[in-house]
Amino acid sequence: MSPSSLLAPEMQVAVRLAREAGTLLLDHLRRGLTVEHKTSADDPVTAADREASALILAGLHAAFPDDALLSEEETDDDRRLEHRRVWIVDPIDGTKEFTTGSPDFAVSIGLAASGEAVLGVVYAPATDELFAGAVGAGVTKNGEAAGFSARPDYVISVSGTEYRRELHRQGLPGLAPSGSIALKLARIAAGEADATFTMSPRSEWDVCAGDALVRASGGLLRRRDGRPIRYNGPRPHIEQGIIGGRPEAVAWLETELAARGLPTAHLGLTPGDPAWAVLDPADQAALAAEPGVYVRHAGGRALALLVVDPLSREVRRASGDPFHLERLTRDVTRALGPLGSGEPLPAARP
């Protein structure tokens, strides 16, 4: 049997639920929104997020009761780690855009099996665009076959926030800033852009569906340090920036990023991670047993460093360039919640 026929029931259910959730979101927009914030003004949440999540998860559980579920808006249950298949859902990817009147938000429903993204549905309710695909079966947009572009001048889809704050100064050609990362990946898979990257970390629910779509078109999505993204981890967060798209566009983009020294964060750094090498030898020795090491780095050197107690969220050390330290603090706050000040950890002596 073809991959398409093997996952046909899953695709049918995911498409239906994405459209139903999209209808719910548009209804909320018509009635007006009450916006709360999780960790900062850049991290909003609404009742629509929660209701769409509940709708999607209930539908998936009814159709596939043996599969695990993971959603940004639900309490995580580590029993999902016992399952080979897990549905990974972001009911509104691009909540900030949703709350500010931009059409650049999407419902994202992905299926991962044995750690790999295998099926994705991304629906943009405001523009009624539905992207669907499974690895080995290709991608459709609104029911019509779609795929990578062959354009020679690459379109690089980037975060609107990262573009405003620093990317606009870098001279990197072809940048197209926007909101939802799931929608970025879907548009890449359908040939409307060619590659994407981030400096800040993302979570599994941000990218699982889009990853499946890109892979279904013959592309790739990975961590900025070159390692693969694996899904259904104990902490469902990708601890660093990502890069992906058409393979030839990604190869070009990686060269350009290296030449310009564009940074990425790495959260929860350990001695086994490639980015550990950006710390100087004294810090490597002093921090080897620390569980909460966070770094922003580029060109083989650390630009900013935070050491945070992961339980109390107290900052034990903060050092580096002020701009990069502010960016790193934002990323860590989004991952852990508001940070506090504690007993400082002295800088390592060379």
Image (cartoon, rainbow, N blue to C red):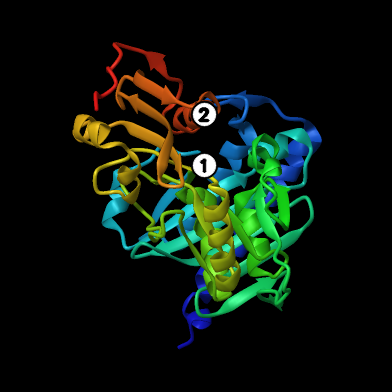
Circle number at residue 89:
none
Residue extending farthest to the bottom is: 1
Q: Quadrant of residue 133?
A: bottom right
Circle number at residue 200:
1
Which x, y percent locates residue 283? 26, 32
* 239 is higher (above) or lower (below) than 254: above
Q: Residue at x 49, y 27 (%)?
A: 321
Residue extending farthest to the front is: 350
Q: Residue at x 69, y 45 (%)?
A: 24
Q: Quadrant of residue 349?
A: top left
Q: Which residue is mark 2?
A: 330
On screen, residue 304 versus residue 255, left or right, reads left
On screen, residue 60 versus residue 295, left or right, reads right
Q: Residue at x 50, y 53 (%)?
A: 242
Is residue 213 visible to us here? no
Tell me which label, 2 or 1, sits earlier in the chain. Answer: 1
Q: Residues within 10 Å of mark 1 (few under 14, many from 20)?
A: many
